[in-house]
Amino acid sequence: MLVLQILINGLLLGGMYILLAQGLNLVFGVMGVVNLAHGAIITVAGLFTFWFATHTQLNPLVLLPVVFVAMLAIGALLQRSLLEPLAGVGRKSELLSLMITFGLSYVLVEIGLDVFGSQYVSLPNLQTTWSLGGLTINEALVAAGVLGAAISGALQIWLRHTDSGKCLLATSQNRIGAVACGIDVSRMRCIAFAIGSSLAAAAGVLIIMVIPLAAQTADSLTILAFVVVALGGLGDYRGAALAAVVLGIAQSAVGYYGGGDAESVVPYLLFILFMILRPQGLGRAVQAQ
Amino acid sequence: MSFERDTLGRQLRNRLTPAAAAFPSRGRQAYRAVAGLTMLAVLAVAPLLSSGYVLQLATDILTFVALAYSWNLISGFTGYVSFGQVTFFGMGAYATAVMVLHTPIPWYLAIPIAVLLAAMAALLLGAVMLRLRGIMFALGMLGLARILAVVAANWSFAGGAVGLTLPAQLTPNAVYAGAWAAALIAFGLNAFYMRSGLGLSAMGVRDDEGAAQALGVATGRVKILTFVLSALAPAAVGGLVAWNRSFIDPTSAFDPNMDLQLVVFTLFGGIGTLWGPLLGTLVLMLVGEQLWAYVPELQLALYGGLVIVVVLAFPGGMVGLANRFGWLLRRPIFAPRSFPAAIVPPPAPPSRPPDDTILEVRDLSVHFRGIVALDTLSFDVRRGESVSILGANGAGKTTLFNAVTGFVVPSEGSILYQDRPVAGLAPFQRARQGIARTFQIPRLMESMTVWENVLLAAQHGRLSRRALEQTAWALHITGLAPMWLESIARLTPGQQRRLELARSLALGPTLVLLDEVMAGMTRDEQEEIRGVLRRLPEFGVAAVAGIEHVISAIADISDRMIVLDHGKKIAEGAPAAVLRDPVVIQSYLGEVR
């Protein structure tokens, strides 16, 4: 029964992690950049959700589509103004883009700190727990896990079964090949960053229901997302989904036996292991270039 | 060490250019040195005599100058951008604090010991972290700093999340003096990199790590050494600050905001430059000090925004802007005042039998996941011989060169260079033993002058008079002497190929592998390369040229020709005979009807 409990919690946590990492993966695949502002977008979206829900008493989930669409526009704007100018500068473009997202993350985090303060907050909504034959299941975790997995699944269907999605996928697999097929790669970069940002924002809306957030947690969320992506193989969406579930289960198991501190160390430990064992790592992504 | 090299350079300058020998007057240099030192002394003493506020500000500025210069070393020179230099600051802080609390070691020993410990940690970490490239290294360092903060927060010996309280012992004056020392050391290291072979190698790693390996640069060692050096000042400063505040905790010791400050100060001043970190720190901290009084909560957001603005609008920073007016330009490393008039050719090759085999390729096969790039290829090259390898695109020429130079591991077969197997030797070791190469698409060091590109190869990891002579000779023989101080961007494609050739000759090779050395050249340019290739035997250099198109230009200067088709050797012999071979004509030039 205990094992089942841990598995269910881990699975639901994993569902949320899939969404958390999906945007980072998409941006990396298409633009070759690890978006260091990813965690900041998640955090700011989460804190905004908290603010909105506590002031309006509405269900935070109604914000999900609104935040998603708003972030699409903001993401597109950010990509066009900050990152696209660097796309043409050759070998150094990736490092320079990384610096831009580094700066951007601070801008977002500090704005978040000024507007929302530095205290950890978590939404009190959806805190019903269901008892099911000895298992206790948290409503918010179910909502976050299921919605997270569903949004990620929808993205996968779009990427693999529609023309516009396939163009994006093609660009992430082989940029030059995509150009040769007449795909407007610059537009794809914009779309990728816009969708990547809105996925991050959606993840923020869900996470705030489960995990307490504060502006300063932004970095650890970026690292968490990166760990998921790196474990699954950069640019490999199925691998990332599997990694997210594994991480979720590992974390919920460690959390049960070792407490909260140990739980929060799990992603970092995996991060170190990844760096040591697979420094050239990124298996498929590297070969695809 | 640096003194010796400097003297050597000066001697050489004088020896090579007697007319200019009197130019840099020693009197003027001494005057400038005295003036500079006086200014430094005034700057150093003034804060001590004024208010505590000024002393604190001066200490803060010096602290960040030291940190920014250290960050510049690893991120600016080797191009490995680190978002976690605070790691070493925190290590220094904790090591010092623990020593102070648990041992009777006095502070002036505790801090150097902390620096030593941080350097050892950097050595171990560097071996792992520097295997990561580009953005992965940046991200790895970011994660490392966070991990150490978590470790410190959960380690009760180090005070856990609460932190450690130190007995307040260190006076502001002592901290100030220590910060001066750290800043001077960090600046000194940058200055050394700006004018030494090590700095040249680091810049080679930044511009093109693979090409640097091929030119004999021990890239791994250069990176790790730079990483270790970049840890010294942060560790010292960490110890000083911990003691000055007489309190440390994980959040302040591994403060991620500190990395933002290093990045923004250095970028604003000019990354990879000698004066950038100093200018950026001075300007932003002095201006910032006024500004933050009004909007204290926006400081980090504005810094973040400034990173974006600098990267997008003026990536060279303040020094980059100054360069446009001809100020603060980087001086080419070990360039004499004018191009050496006396050209010293390389020492004559050892007189050995003319049929002395230097390269033996035996049954060499290279597979890439099922694709056979080279298939049981065997051939020899003798000293001073000129061999051309003919083959269409994809025939395996570049793979062969990559296998011989160590960039590709053979699947089967062996390669013997001067009767010794080369398996297991890194590319830079093979280069230093005399296997030189050029690349199909020239891979020149973009941020360097023509002179430095060649010197990088000539130095063999250590600058010597011989390296300077070899550089001058290689530029002379390839006809590049007139543009020796040009930047790479101003060379024509033909000149770029000649520079690749000059670089490979500067290694002092016995064997040069030329990948498509004449592709895309005009007749005149081809003639210039042919002139150089014809002279190679007199220096004991064997040339193996991979050729796809310009067969006529290479046939008459080749002793022997080998034809590859889909990784297999289909013909070998004298060029005239090979080119008439029906098998060659059929596979390479087309069906005979």
Image (cartoon, coloured by chain):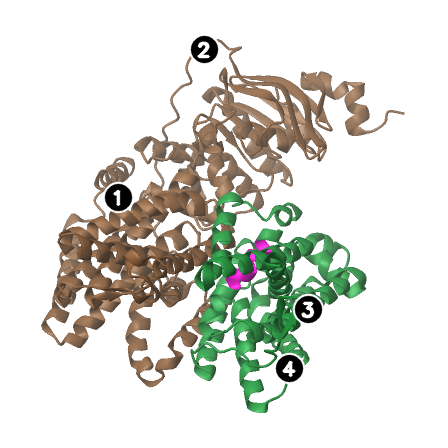
Residue at 67%, 83% (x, y): give it. Answer: A62
Label 2: chain letter: B
Residue at 44%, 58% (x, y): give it. Answer: B142
- Identify the hue of chain B: brown
B91 relative to B356 in the view: left or right? left
- Callouts 3 and 1 on one subunit: no
Residue denoted by label 1: B20
Q: Are marks 3 and 1 in contact (CB under 8 Å)?
A: no
Q: Quadrant of the N terminus of chain A?
A: bottom right
Label 1: chain letter: B
Residue denoted by label 4: A63
Label 4: chain letter: A
Residue B34 lies in the magenta stretch: no
Q: Is residue B423 above or below residue B270?
A: above
Q: Earlier in the sequence, mark 4 or mark 3?
A: 4
Nearer the observer, disc 1 or disc 4? 4
Residue denoted by label 2: B352
Nearer the observer, disc 2 or disc 3? 3
Q: Position of residue B376 (x, y in %)?
A: 68, 21
B32 relative to A264 in the view: left or right? left
User: Which chain does the green colour mark?
Assistant: A
Q: Please give the count of numbered marks on the rendered protein.
A: 4
User: B147 or B523: nearer the eye?
Assistant: B147
Residue denoted by label 3: A146
